Amino acid sequence: MSIRTDKVAEEIKHQLAGILSRDLAELRLGLVTVTRVRISKDLKNAKVYVSFIGNKDSTEICLEKVNNRKKKIRMHLGANMHLRYVPELDFYFDDNMEYASRIDEIIKEIHKDDTGEVDSSEVADTNEESKDQ
């Protein structure tokens, strides 16, 4: 991506975070985080990745609520930004937070089982190998 598209994507990300939390509070989405915005080179299409925290609804329902309000979101975005074209927005769920959380749980389980002591079966295996040599 070019520097211009990176800057525009970052500004869209910032503006959308405010729009989703402030102007669309009636959707009751919980804490909405705009994690990433990918914009086309011609600045006419944008993929917006969001995550939802503290919501009772499933992520599919939350995404449907947001996608149903695309026109209103674009209107707010156009009012806040000075671009020749306000990009078409496509919203996607970003599951990186859940993925990272799951990896963290697995690492904690591994370290919980790791007491620093060597298992007696491992000691027996190493003793047999040293006798064979």
Image (spheres, rainbow, N blue to C red):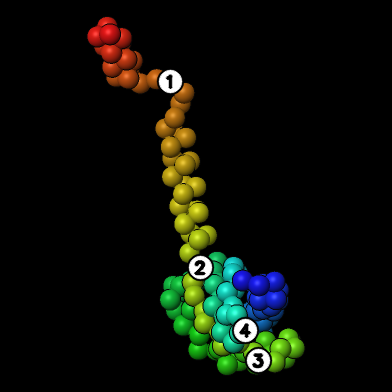
Q: Earlier in the sequence, mark 3 or mark 2?
A: 3
Q: Assess disc 3: are there few (<14), some (14-19) or many (≥20) residues with their C-alpha within 10 Å of its C-alpha.
A: few
Pinpoint residue 52: horizontal percent, then vertical percent. 54, 69
Element marked by disc 1 = loop
Q: Is residue 18 visible?
A: no
- Image quarter hosting the C terminus: top left
Specify few, some or many for label 1: CA neighbours under 10 Å numbering under 14, 14-19, or 20 or more.
Answer: few
Q: Which residue is mark 3?
A: 85
Q: Which residue is mark 2?
A: 94
Contact, mark 3 vs mark 4 (Cβ under 8 Å): yes
Residues at marks 1 and 3 touching, judged by CB atoms closer than 8 Å? no
Q: State the separation of the CA atoms marked 1 and 3.
A: 64 Å
Q: Tell me the CA gap for discs 1 and 2.
A: 40 Å
Determine contact: label 4, label 1, CB under 8 Å: no
Residue located beneath label 1 in the image? 117
On screen, residue 87 versus residue 96, left or right, reads right
Amino acid under disc 4: Leu
